[in-house]
Image: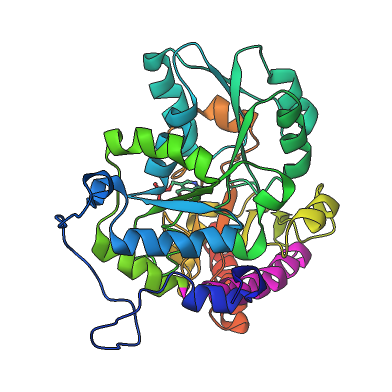
Amino acid sequence: MSKKKLGLNTICTHVGEIKDEQFKGAISPIYLSTSYEFDNVDVKRYPRYFNTPNQEYLAKKIAALEHTETAMIFGSGMAAISHMFLAFLQQGDHIVVQNTLYGGTSNFIREEFPKYGIEFSFTDGYAVSDFEAAIQPNTKLIHIETPSNPLLTVTDIKGVADLAKSKRIVTTIDNTFASPVNQNPIDFGIDIVMHSATKYLGGHSDILAGAVASTQEHMDRIWNVSKNLGGSLSDFTVWMLERSMKTLALRVKAQTKNAKKLAKFLDKHDDVAKVYYPGLKSHPEHKLAKTQMHDFGAMLSFELNEGIDAMAFQKQLELIKSSMSLAGVESTMLLPSETSHALLTPEQRAAVGISDQLIRFSVGIETLKDLKQDIEQAITKTKVASFA
Ligand code: PLP
């Protein structure tokens, strides 16, 4: 059966299964060996070489979901990002990244690249022309993140990929927020896709992992660096990730359905000043999002009206948890200014539009009416408390 013809849920459930030949169990066995007998010294298995049975087989599922030849699993999303960047950049090279970037990636670039003599530019915006303006003769990589964290800005994937190709620059994308269920950047010409698998791929807030998907040629370069840096994932967690990914499409579609309704609910709410969600017609890149996303995802952000303190509101929530991470089946909220973007200076935050009132909402699979009720009661209690 050709993998291309398989439906999304079939890929999630079956691609990359390891057949249990010995006992005929329904699920993949787990191989925890760190030592494997070899017939040929060229193909020795070792966890840090990213080639244990569980790693190799799960990579097939991720590659099938992202429409690539191959994939690799890492110990975290940051391990995936850092190994991927360092595979394509060396002293004297230059990378262009967008200014609306995940805080951890931004810190990695600002803090580590100067030590390696790697130059970088953050764009002024996230339009293709902003990327073009930042390109230098030594630019080797362009990295995008769309929809972005936490403002859900949408970058033109094909536009950036075409621009980079015309200048022989490699492109990478952080596809964490959309997940492969809602976006497949390879189909628009991007070279390498990465994920914080801690998020939707894991989906239950109990796994720290990362993944990269690309052609074999690009992956060979990433592997060469990665085996030296050593950021591979334990096979037990690889196995947990495979189990979680069986329900990836079911989860993400349910979360996206809730998010679309909640975005509209918040948009119409008298106490909400602004909602950031690519599925809203008022979102500046709604039309672009429609052309490059299968659906609009389950992340949104919003600002409460001035006078309704965002931190106090969060404390009043009873069902929705205040939590650092995102994309689990449970709904969570956080204030980027206090958490994910706390390491940026207030000036850096202001420059990318992150106000102290901004709340990031990772929508879960709970019953919609319960989520609406929780938001409503938290707003009412915050207002009563502030006027008391
Ligand atoms: N990319 C995005 C968009 C993220 O939100 C995160 C973490 O929050 C990362 C990358 C880093 O992933 P990890 O925490 O798995 O290292």
Instruction: Indicate yes or no whether the magenta region holds residue 200.
Output: no
The figure's colour scheme reads rainbow
Q: Is residue 221 above or below residue 44?
A: above
Q: Residue at x 73, y 35 (%)?
A: 160
- Predominant SS along the magenta part: helix
Image quadrant of residue 347?
A: top right
Asked whether, in this view, residue 254 is left or right of residue 236, the answer is: right
Q: Position of residue 208 (x, y in %)?
A: 34, 56
- Which residues fall within the magenta stretch? 246-270
Q: Residue at x 66, y 58 (%)?
A: 183
Image quadrant of residue 296?
A: bottom right
Q: Residue at x 55, y 73 (%)?
A: 11
Image quarter hosting the N terminus: bottom right
Is residue 158 among what the camera can see? yes
Q: Considering depth in this image, is 105 or 227 the residue closer to the camera?
A: 227
Instruction: Indicate yes or no whether the magenta region holds residue 268.
Output: yes
Asked whether, in this view, residue 348 is left or right of residue 14, the answer is: right
Q: Is residue 358 above or below residue 181?
A: above
Q: Position of residue 220 (x, y in %)?
A: 44, 39
Q: Considering depth in this image, is 326 or 223 the residue closer to the camera?
A: 223
Image quadrant of residue 134?
A: top right
Q: Considering depth in this image, is 381 or 99 the residue closer to the camera?
A: 99
Q: Is residue 16 above or below residue 367?
A: above
Q: Position of residue 328 (x, y in %)?
A: 46, 67
Q: Position of residue 211 (x, y in %)?
A: 44, 51
Q: Is residue 78 above or below residue 359?
A: above
Is residue 342 among what the camera can see? no
Residue lying furthest front: 39
